[in-house]
Amino acid sequence: MNSIDTIKEKPNTPSIQYATLPADSEHFFYTQTRILPTQKSHLQKNRIISGFKPGEWLESYKMLRTRCLQVMDANEWTTLAITSPNETSGSSLTVANLAISIAMELNRSVLLVDTNFMNPGICNLFGLNTELGLSDYLLHDTPISELLINPDLDRLVILPTGKEMLNTPEMLRSPKMIRLVHELKNRYPSRVVIFDMPPLLSQADTLGFAPCVDCVLLVVDEGHTKTAELKEAASLLKNINVLGTVLNKASNKKIKYKAS
């Protein structure tokens, strides 16, 4: 994974004061959110960093976290969509591990929203079994508080996809979804909201939803993403705040940190 390329522009958004969580916030308790324990063996099998001891692999995500947060804080951004040009880039793994890494910071919390309805991967990566999720809120007005899950990790909450929806592009840019993004963004000043999105070039969901968030991070696969695909993705995102690109599955030995 290479260093991310960032943009300099600062949007015309109001100043945000980041709240500081208590000093002992590593002892974070959830009173309404369901806590579902994870299995270390499952996390290790799926290369989730919380299942491993500290090492170079974890440090690579800490480096990615630091660079992302530096740019997001400078621009007062708190919502991030992560996508890839195609199916093979491993973006969901990058999403999960980046979210865990950000949640390790004691003055941050993370809400990870799985919005890849055709191929949801976040709960599978963590080994969480749940049937309810975002679609239940959008279609049936199920309260968000009944849908959130804590994977037994401090300061990290997951909103699963729920059941598959037939009209996901329309639902993801509906007024109801836009209101939800605004609510998630503004409820807790210290929260970073990350959306795991489907591939940009194969589904309309991501392109339609991207304007609803502050910025987008693009994950590319060194072994499979073609130059033409990357150029097309960049063209589609030309009017979106692109936080940067992550080169996943890098084989260059000079690159000191990798996403897989």
Image: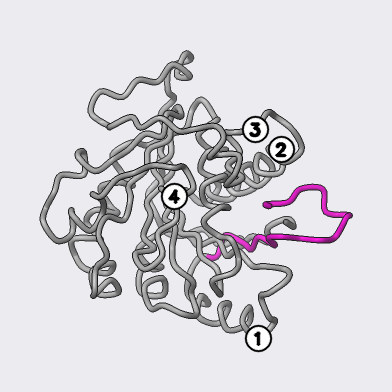
CB-based contact (under 8 Å), mark 4 and mark 2: no
Residue 46: x percent and y percent? 57, 47
- Tell me which secondary structure the magenta stretch mostly adopts: loop
Instruction: Return the residue found at the far top.
Output: 24
Give the structural element (helix, strand or loop) at label 2.
helix
Colour setup of the view = one colour
Is residue 257 inside the magenta stretch? yes
Query: Label 2: which residue?
Result: 59
Start-end of magenta stretch: 242-260
Q: Earlier in the sequence, mark 2 or mark 1?
A: 2
Any mark on residue 124, and which?
4
Residue drawn at (37%, 49%), measured in percent from left and top? 14
Any mark on residue 52, and which?
3
Query: Label 1: which residue?
Result: 228
Give the structural element (helix, strand or loop) at label 3.
loop
Q: Amino acid at mark 1?
A: Ala
CA separation, marks 2 and 3? 12 Å
Q: Amino acid at mark 2?
A: Glu
* Foreground label between 4 and 1: 4
CA separation, marks 4 and 1? 31 Å
Q: Earlier in the sequence, mark 4 or mark 1?
A: 4
